[in-house]
Amino acid sequence: MQEHPLTLTSDDDHLIHGTLFEPDQPRAVLVISHGMAEHDGRYAGFARWLGEHDIATITFNHRGHGPASAKDDLGHYSDQQGWHKVTDDLYRVLGHARARFPGVPVLLLGHSMGSFIAQSCIQQHKKAADALILSATNRINKPQLLAYQLLIGGLLKVYGRRHRSPTLTNLSFGRFNKAFEPARTDSDWLSRDPAQVDAYLADPLCGFQCTTGLWQDFVRGILSINPGQWPKDLPVHLFAGTEDPVAEMGTGVTRHFRAIRDAGVKRVTLRLFEGGRHEMLNETNVDQVRDYILSLCQSHIQPEQPGPEHASQGKKAGARPSGVDTD
């Protein structure tokens, strides 16, 4: 297992920083698109574990996130075309994965904010990945998003794109924590594991306020997502905790699952983990979640060509029915 620093350059000369975790004989590669107000380093332990099972992983930081972001840029995509730029960055990382591991399945895992960036990227670049895994995502709630858009528009007129609004923070992260009051911390909604919550709070690259400009880009980006424009043969796997407020305690992500299925995507699955909160990879049942994601990766690995004596028994890798699975 080797770890390589990764640096790619975008069209506007932005440097995309990440890490490639490469086992000796990778059978698949997983690209991880992280969530809002966190960074790629939080996935290193998971990536190393996947490497033990012959799965390569690429983690990277979205614009406005990670140690390379200047202080003023932390929590800010760009002054112009922010959503286009973050989706294009992800497309470049996927392209690098494809070029680095030719003939190997490329899977895309998007968590929370990163799940919406992933969906937008796949919608624009239909062959960028061989499977899409969505962690802690939610339905496209147009009435709510349009209301947010009006509020954001007013704040932009008064304060500009780089303003950091406590109102927007309270409407998002603050609202998520209310379900767990009386709460030990402001971030109890992330995980049932107090050690993981404390590590998040102690990390200077986590939990920061994002700019009004980022919120405008983010809301507009979500509103542009339309599963009807996705490739119909793309396998899509959704998972979330039943106590994740972002996923509306399982109901919102279930509605999104149905919307994707009803849009004609042929293979869609949903896994709900009972009692889990927002960060299932940092939850008390993390081993179960890791095994689940590993099984998804393995299901997309093409088996070795069977010999003539076994040809009649061959099965297409990963063939399983669409449906909902709950723990």
Image (tube, rainbow, N blue to C red):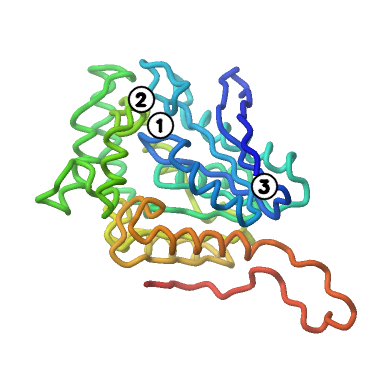
Q: Residues within 10 Å of mark 2 (few under 14, many from 20)?
A: many
Q: Which residue is mark 1?
A: 217
* Image quadrant containing the C terminus: bottom left
SS label for mark 1:
helix
Q: Residues within 10 Å of mark 3 (few under 14, many from 20)?
A: some
Q: Amino acid at mark 2?
A: Gly
- Residue reaching furthest to the left: 182
Q: Position of residue 9 (x, y in %)?
A: 63, 23
Q: Which residue is mark 2?
A: 213
Q: Nearer the viewer, residue 197 or 105?
A: 197
Q: Position of residue 2 (x, y in %)?
A: 65, 39
Q: Position of residue 325 (x, y in %)?
A: 43, 72
SS label for mark 3:
loop
Q: Is residue 101 left or right of residue 89?
A: right
Q: Nearer the viewer, residue 95 or 57?
A: 57
Determine whether label 1 and label 2 are within 8 Å by CB: yes
- Residue reaching furthest to the right: 308
Q: Nearer the viewer, residue 131 or 28?
A: 28
Q: Which of the marked residues, 3 or 1, is nearer the chain's N terminus?
A: 3
Q: Position of residue 238 (x, y in %)?
A: 46, 60
Judged by depth in the image, the label closer to the viewer, 3 or 2, is 3
Q: Which residue is mark 3?
A: 23
Q: Which of the marked residues, 3 or 2, is nearer the chain's N terminus?
A: 3
SS label for mark 2:
helix
